[in-house]
Image (cartoon, rainbow, N blue to C red):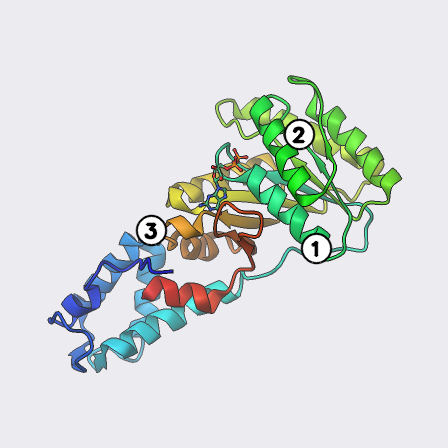
Amino acid sequence: KDEKPAKPGFFGRLMGRKDTKVVTRRVLDDDMLEQLEELLISADMGVDTALRVTANMAEGRFGTKLSTHEIKELMSTEVTRIMESVAKPMPLYPRKPQVVLVVGVNGSGKTTTIGKLASQFKAAGKSVVIAAGDTFRAAAVEQLQVWGDRAGVPVLTAPEGSDPASLAFDAMVKAETDGADLLLIDTAGRLQNRADLMEELSKIVRVIRKKDETAPHNTLLVLDATTGQNALGQVETFQKLADVSGLVMTKLDGTAKGGVLVALADKFGLPIHAIGVGEQIDDLAPFDPEDFAKALTG
Ligand code: GDP
């Protein structure tokens, strides 16, 4: 990736020069900390998390002289430390089918992510069924069918406007009959009417629990990383609507502002199961804290 979150020449300016390759050292003082905070905030880390990161960087080092390399290392170490606690693949259970409810606002990448997940699980030898639970968006259902075909996974659909909970129930029956390992359920992402959406999601949960009282086993919230700080509000909202168990962060290929992942980790501590790095079926990767920290700090 050639995109760097840091503004070009940031570290050069920080050190008072253009050429960062020349090794000079600068005292870690309030002025430097302020500039570092600004850098992190401009990468969408949010004020609270940026302050915590810089405070940790300064601990025991205030007033000492640091090189650009050392500053980057310190920053990268801090970010890695925060992110290591949330980098966890989606847990798999011996349950058949394991029911994965996928939630998130429209446009976040839910459909695409479900297609990618189906393909990955299939490649890992799992049998998968998809339920196109956003029955109000004909386009979403069609898209999901396209993804299902690509992944070679059956997609259960229902007529436009029909009850997503009854589709979810039918999908449970089909997944059970087929002996499927995983059932991925897409859901609506219309936040305009939260009460409706909450009712819809809780009805899906109620109905699938008639078949398996332990379901859903995972509730994945899909978040678009390019929405920056909005992602924080979406977590808060969806935690009220559903029992979110983990995150998938999409569109990390298209943003220089991945700092919001650090803010999310710092604030909610929800596991990040995977990241979307493109629009193709294979563009879903495990979240690697060290790679992420290096990309973020430049
Ligand atoms: P949904 O409305 O939440 O189901 O969102 P979609 O799955 O339809 O995705 C919305 C748009 O985002 C589509 O154009 C996708 O191709 C695109 N998209 C989804 N995930 C990624 C990703 O990881 N990277 C990029 N660059 N685009 C993505």
Query: Residue 139 location, x and y as percent?
Result: 56, 25
* Badge 2: residue crowd in 10 Å (few <14, some 14–19, many ≥20): many
Residue 133 numbered mark, or none: 2
Residue type beneath disc 1: Ala
Distance of label 3 from label 2 (alpha carbons): 32 Å
Q: Are marks 3 and 2 in contact (CB under 8 Å)?
A: no
| Visible residue check, residue 264 | yes
Distance of label 2 from label 1 (alpha carbons): 24 Å
Pick whichever of labels 3 and 1 is earlier in the sequence.
Answer: 3
Residue 123 numbered mark, or none: 1
Instruction: Residue at 48%, 52% (x, y): give it.
Output: 277
Above/below status of 277 relative to 199 = below
Above/below status of 205 relative to 114 = above
Position of residue 151 in the picture relative to residue 49 (left or right): right
Residue toward you, 270 or 169: 169
Instruction: Residue at 43%, 47% (x, y): give it.
Output: 225
Badge 2 element = loop
Pick whichever of labels 2 and 1 is earlier in the sequence.
Answer: 1
Residue type beneath disc 2: Gly
